[in-house]
Image (cartoon, helix red, strand yellow):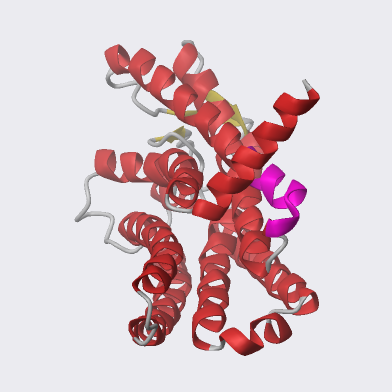
Amino acid sequence: MGGTNMSSFKGFILKGVSDHPQLEMIFFVAILFSYLLTLMGNLTIILISRLDARLHTPMYFFLSNLSSLDLAFTTSSVPQMLMNLWGPDKTISYGGCITQLYVFLWLGATECILLVVMAFDRYVAICRPLHYMTIMNPRLCWQLAAIAWLGGLGNSLIQSTFTLQLPLCGHQEVDNFLCEVPALIKLACGDTNLNQALLNGVCAFFTAVPLSIILISYGYIARAVLKIPSAAGRRKAFNTCGSHLIVVFLFYGSAIYAYLLPAKSSSQDRGKFISLFYSVVTPMVNPLIYTLRNKEVKGALRRLLGKGREQG
């Protein structure tokens, strides 16, 4: 059968859990609930980081970047998922699928870099406290944020464009909840070794390098924290770093599982649910981790709600 590349298709079918129709309504309710929590949690962090002058620090600048990223990340896939779970129509237009592919990959890679930037910020705060405001000046913060967003975009442009060259031979059923590179590579009927090698190489780079930098920086941070004389100081330092570390392990753990484990060794269903985890669960959990473990955020929320009540 002759190979036509992906651009000749009008649309794709996102299977999701269509093999188990009895699960569709359960998934719909769970994903909708998660999405609403994600919107509320991340918008709250962006708002309080902007409105509370005490949070005008590099740490909250990067945290609101992460929240903006999570909002866009989840919005690039969840509304389409909900539409496909709600009714019999499981299709996504060609343009919708390609947009999702580019945006999802862009934001995923951006988060990889942004988590490194946040680790660097914590390293400077704890290991170089006297020079913190000089080193982490507004100009450097904007530059680091721009590197994260542009680095992620560069990765997406290369990988997505490369994936779109694959011949499909009439295969239109994407066995996933969303259009992402591993699922689309599986649709191809030609030789996908080069694509798989590129995917593995880029993903190894975007996970191994940032994760190594984060872990090394946390080695230095742990050493510095243990030298803090007061128990309260040590606890505060461990709390802010602990939140970041939990987010790092949730994000990188699911990304490594989805992108780097060989396709044959991980079952397709498991791969599907892992992509659901980092597109739906992680963006919802991030703001919860940061707010529940952070006194400054809780204080800012109380002040903001107090002002609202006074004005009311």
Query: As rendered, which of 281 and 56 lies closer to the eye?
Result: 56
* 211 versus 183 height, above or below: below
Which quadrant: the C terminus? Answer: top right
Which quadrant: the N terminus? Answer: top left
Residue 260 shows up from this direction: yes
Query: As rendered, which of 147 and 159 lies closer to the eye?
Result: 147
Q: Residue at the spot x=64%, y=31% of the render?
A: 10
Query: As rendered, which of 233 and 161 lies closer to the eye?
Result: 233
Tell me if 308 is positioned left or right of 98 in this view: right
Query: As rendered, which of 229 and 149 lies closer to the eye?
Result: 229
Residue 168 shows up from this direction: no
Residue at the outermost left position:
265
Q: Residue at the spot x=39%, y=48% of the render?
A: 186
* 199 versus 119 height, above or below: above
Q: Quadrant of residue 30?
A: top left
Q: Majority secondary structure of the magenta segment?
A: helix
Counting from the top left corner in percent of width and height, residue 105 is at 56, 55
Counting from the top left corner in percent of width and height, residue 228 is at 39, 83
Q: Is residue 233 magenta?
A: no
Q: Which residues are magenta?
A: 43-54
Tell me if 45 is positioned left or right of 251 in this view: right
Tell me if 159 is positioned left or right of 288 in this view: right
Counting from the top left corner in percent of width and height, residue 298 is at 54, 45
Q: Residue at the spot x=50%, y=87% of the render?
A: 127
Q: Is residue 52 magenta?
A: yes
Counting from the top left corner in percent of width and height, residue 156 is at 61, 61
Q: Residue at the spot x=43%, y=66% of the render?
A: 236
Q: Quadrant of residue 21?
A: top left
